[in-house]
Image (cartoon, rainbow, N blue to C red):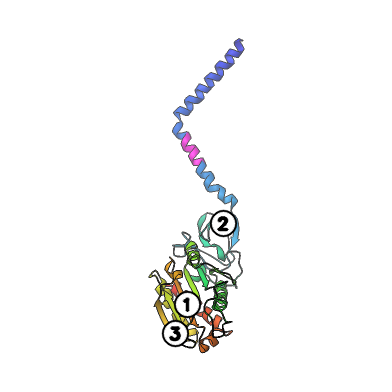
Amino acid sequence: MDTNNNKLSEISMNKEIIFNFIKRNLVQIGLSIAFGAVAIFLILPLFNSKTVYVGLDQVAIRSSNSRTSKKIGTLNQYQTVSVLSKSNHWYHIRYDDTKMGWIPDWITNRSFPKGQKETPLAESIIVIDAGHGGVDSGALGIDQSHEEKKYTLRVSKAIQSKLDHSGAKVIMTRDNDSFIELAERPQIANRNHADAFISIHFDSSGENNAGTGDTTYYYHDNGSIELGKAINKQLINDVPLYNRGVKFANYQVLRDNKRPAILIEGGYINTDSDFKKLSSASYPKKVAKAVHQGLINFLSR
């Protein structure tokens, strides 16, 4: 019995000693736990990270997930880095063992020609909107089997290919003959924080052969005017149509867009001379070339 009492007494004393120790060192213990938690939080992602390589040369490392943020370093073509996290299509990376920064995720683990350097376009997200689609045929040609939706998609895909080869991230509002609600199109650009939104359409007049030429439209003064001017200047140079200039228009895809946004009416589908050009095999490539160079000029300001 005495032995049991002694054991209970020892346990009680030990508890009291431990309690007094914790009470006297409460602040130090709290700080130790906090520092330990922070260390785990910082170190754990390093063990869980994946490794990727950059496909372009002279890739800028940014201080945050935006092409306009401060440049803090450079990566050479095929250099590998560790990915810590992802936000808005950008990777938070660790490089040179201890340094951290941000690069676009879309230029990683992709093959580009040897020596191809990163440009402002390769750091950009571009939304291409092929007008109409599905049950919405758009305007009709003189031969009404010629539907606007077919030609907007044709041109949009040519632009997509051209920009993709330059390293840009291209998001299509549609890439097949599907119907996309008008209100959804600008929201695609808004959600993805696009650097530019370009909607492709073809004009028509009340009477056949009554109109001609291509026109570039904008709504907001948020970079959209500058974008419109940069691309329209190249349309004048590269596309063999009468150019009607850059104009204001209250189109929903422009009005609801918080990103730099334009709409190109690429000639009159119900004018014989315009349709002959816009339906030619070379026309999509000419528009793609103009949009590509216009974007380069706009983004390099």
**Residue depicted at x 54% and y 44%:** 40
Q: Which mark is residue 264?
A: 1
Q: Amino acid at mark 3?
A: Asn
Q: Amino acid at mark 2?
A: Val
Residue 93 percent location from the top left of the image: 53, 57
Q: Quadrant of the N terminus?
A: top right
Is mark 1 in CB contact (under 8 Å) with mark 2? no
Q: Which mark is residue 83?
A: 2
Packing grade of label 2 (10 A; few <14, some 14-19, many >=20) is many
* Picture quadrant of residue 217: bottom left
Packing grade of label 1 (10 A; few <14, some 14-19, many >=20) is many
Report the label total: 3
Q: Say whether disc 1 or disc 3 marks the residue closer to the N-terminus.
A: 3
Which of the pair 247/74 is nearer the observer? 247
Secondary structure of residue under mark 1? strand
Q: Is residue 14 magenta?
A: no
Residue 75 percent location from the top left of the image: 54, 64
Asked if residue 249 is positioned above or below residue 274 in the image, the reply reads above
Packing grade of label 3 (10 A; few <14, some 14-19, many >=20) is some
Q: Say whether disc 1 or disc 2 marks the residue closer to the N-terminus.
A: 2
Q: Which mark is residue 243?
A: 3
Which of the pair 174/82 is nearer the observer? 174
Q: Which residues are magenta?
A: 29-36
